[in-house]
Amino acid sequence: MTAVHTLYLASASPRRKKILNQLGLMTARIRADIDESRHYGESPREYVVRLAREKAAAGWAVVEAEGLPARPLLAADTTVALGDEIFGKPADADEARRMLRRLSGTVHEVFTSVAVRLGGRVEVATSVSKVTFSVLSERQIDAYVASGEPMDKAGAYGIQGRAGLFVAYLEGSYSGVMGLPVHETGRLLATFGIDVLAA
């Protein structure tokens, strides 16, 4: 019989939950609210690493406060960066349009950090991918924003959806751009005794 591992997921992202489920892992959602403001002088990589760590800490505090069984907790953060400029989730349709105009015709980076915590032990891995966007017309941008797809995604696009049409070239992790790099996640979980291939 296949063993099914359960871990806590300190993320509201349906994409992360789906990826973990596809790997054969059951997840229990844990709320992990933190201040996601960028610190002065923080690079995009430093930013996502810190947020993943802080989400893991906030999630573990909930596990302890509620007296839940000790099992690994996974948290992650994804950001899109054009140089030193960071693109988080758009606040509204106008901001989504602005982001897509900025990313149009560029090579930008997508950083995703994954943190796994169990008790006082925390391990972090970061995936960095380079995404080349084709030049987008205003009509394409308007149609994509009207679809509603950009609104809960860093950089106002989801590579796994209609915005896949915008991606001319990808160097790095497809699943990392989605929000959870499978390779790095599997290696991290293995260090906590969860062998995904044996699940």
Image (cartoon, rainbow, N blue to C red):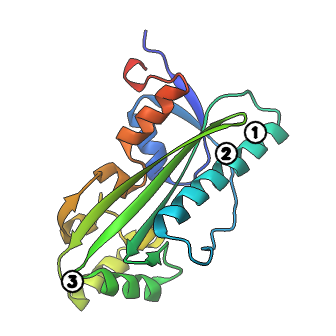
Looking at the image, residue 37 sits to the left or right of residue 144; the answer is right
Residue topped by disc 3: 136
Q: Are marks 3 and 1 in contact (CB under 8 Å)?
A: no
Q: CA distance from mark 2 to mark 3?
A: 38 Å
* Residue at 25 percent of width and 90 percent of height: 138
Label drawn at residue 126: none
Can you give x and y, in whole percent of width and height, for residue 144 in the image? 30, 77
Q: CA distance from mark 2 to mark 1?
A: 8 Å
Can you give x and y, in whole percent of width and height, for residue 75 in the image? 57, 48
- The answer to whether residue 109 of the structure is visible from this angle is yes
* Residue at 49 percent of width and 72 percent of height: 89
**Residue extending furthest toward the top:** 1
Can you give x and y, in whole percent of width and height, for residue 27 in the image? 56, 36
Residue topped by disc 1: 63
At label 1, counting other C-alpha atoms closer than 10 Å, the crowd grade (few under 14, some 14-19, many 20 or more) is some
Residue 104 lies in what quarter of the image? bottom left
Query: In the rendered structure, which amino acid carries the disc numbered 3?
Result: Leu
Q: Are marks 2 and 3 in contact (CB under 8 Å)?
A: no
- The number of numbered discs placed on residues in the rendered structure image is 3
Q: Is residue 192 above or below residue 157?
A: above
Q: Earlier in the sequence, mark 3 or mark 1?
A: 1
Dot 2 falls on a residue whose secondary structure is loop
Which corner quadrant holds the N terminus?
Answer: top left
**Residue extending furthest toward the front:** 41
Query: In the rendered structure, which amino acid carries the disc numbered 1?
Result: Val
Residue topped by disc 2: 30
Q: Observer-nearest residue: 42 or 31?
A: 42
Q: Are marks 2 and 1 in contact (CB under 8 Å)?
A: yes
Query: In the rendered structure, which amino acid carries the disc numbered 2?
Result: Ile
* Residue at 72 percent of width and 33 percent of height: 119
